[in-house]
Amino acid sequence: MKKFILALQLLTRLHIFNLPFDEVTYGKSSMYFPLVGFLLGVILVFLYLGLNYVFPVLVVAALLITGLIFLSGGLHLDGFMDTMDGVLSGRPPERKLEIMRDSRVGAFGVVGLVILLLLKFALLSCLPAQVIPRVLILMPVLSRWGMVYAIARFPYARPQGIGIYLAKYTKSRELAVAALLGCGVAALNGGAGLILFIWLTFLAHFLALLFTRQLGGLTGDTYGAINELLEVILLLTIFPLLKLPFLNFWW
């Protein structure tokens, strides 16, 4: 329970108790990241059901994105912007890490954020109503599973930082628990959910490998960037899945 509460404190604004910091428990809390994603998804579904009775589709999509940003405290978006500033700077790895550490946001971060939010808004607006609740559950669960995969499988780039405890203590057991949680939620959504689980795991590996080659390892910022990119890619992937002739079987 303590690990789950710490995961909740780390990834969201939903602070049940203010637990004292313990690096081992904090590091191992990654196993519950998909469960935190599930809780966020449930909140988003209830938010969607309420908003959908009152507002038009475009407004609902905008408010859902706003709600997710509020619930997560913008943590992953901040990491995404810092990562874009560093990775796209064209500098050596050491300099890229320095740029990412800078509290100021650069042009690449701003442009990346605008593109990311526009894509999320457009994709959510175009989703058929009957699949939106499922997507709102799967999106935060599988993106946070992708983070755990990257944390467990790739080295940390800095000698210090809050993310180093996650990299240090997320071992095979934590990865297995997170995989069971993520795959379990995916399986409840039929074949399409399992396809998305496999696809996003592959993409998490690809993105983590890309960032590792650019930076010499991963950081807390790149964990957030992986989460944000996986959310958008999941939304993009839904549309080809909806074209499958045996749609009813998948959903």
Image (cartoon, grey):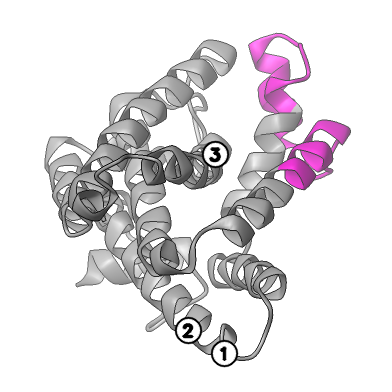
Which of the numbered marks, if any, corresponds to residue 229?
Answer: 3
| Residue 215, image quadrant | top right
Please name which of the two marks, 3 or 1, marks the residue nearer to the observer: 1
Which of the numbered marks, if any, corresponds to residue 139?
Answer: none
Question: Pointer 2 and pointer 1: residues touching (CB < 8 Å)?
Answer: yes
The image shows residue 44, relative to residue 166, as above or below, that is below
x 55%, y 45%: residue: 228
Residue 87: in sight, yes or no? yes
Distance, label 3 to label 1, CA atoms, is 30 Å
Q: Position of residue 74 (x, y in %)?
A: 63, 60
Neighbour tally class for label 1: few under 14, some 14-19, many 20 plus, Cα within 10 Å: few
Q: Position of residue 158 (x, y in %)?
A: 52, 27
The image shows residue 206, relative to residue 145, as above or below, that is above
Q: Position of residue 247 (x, y in %)?
A: 29, 49
Residues rendered magenta in the picture: 86-115
| Residue 83, image quadrant | top right
x 39%, y 31%: residue: 204
Which of the numbered marks, if any, corresponds to residue 53?
Answer: 1
The image shows residue 32, relative to residue 170, as above or below, that is below
Q: Identify the image quadrant of the N terminus.
A: bottom left
Question: Pointer 2 and pointer 3: residues touching (CB < 8 Å)?
Answer: no
The type of residue carrying mark 3 is Leu
Of labels 3 and 1, earlier in sequence is: 1
The type of residue carrying mark 1 is Tyr
Q: Which residue is mark 2?
A: 49
Please name which of the two marks, 2 or 1, marks the residue nearer to the observer: 1
Whether the magenta-drawn stretch holds residue 53 is answered as: no
Dot 3 falls on a residue whose secondary structure is helix
x 42%, y 57%: residue: 140
Q: Residue furthest front?
A: 245
Whether the magenta-drawn stretch holds residue 111 is answered as: yes
x 76%, y 11%: residue: 91
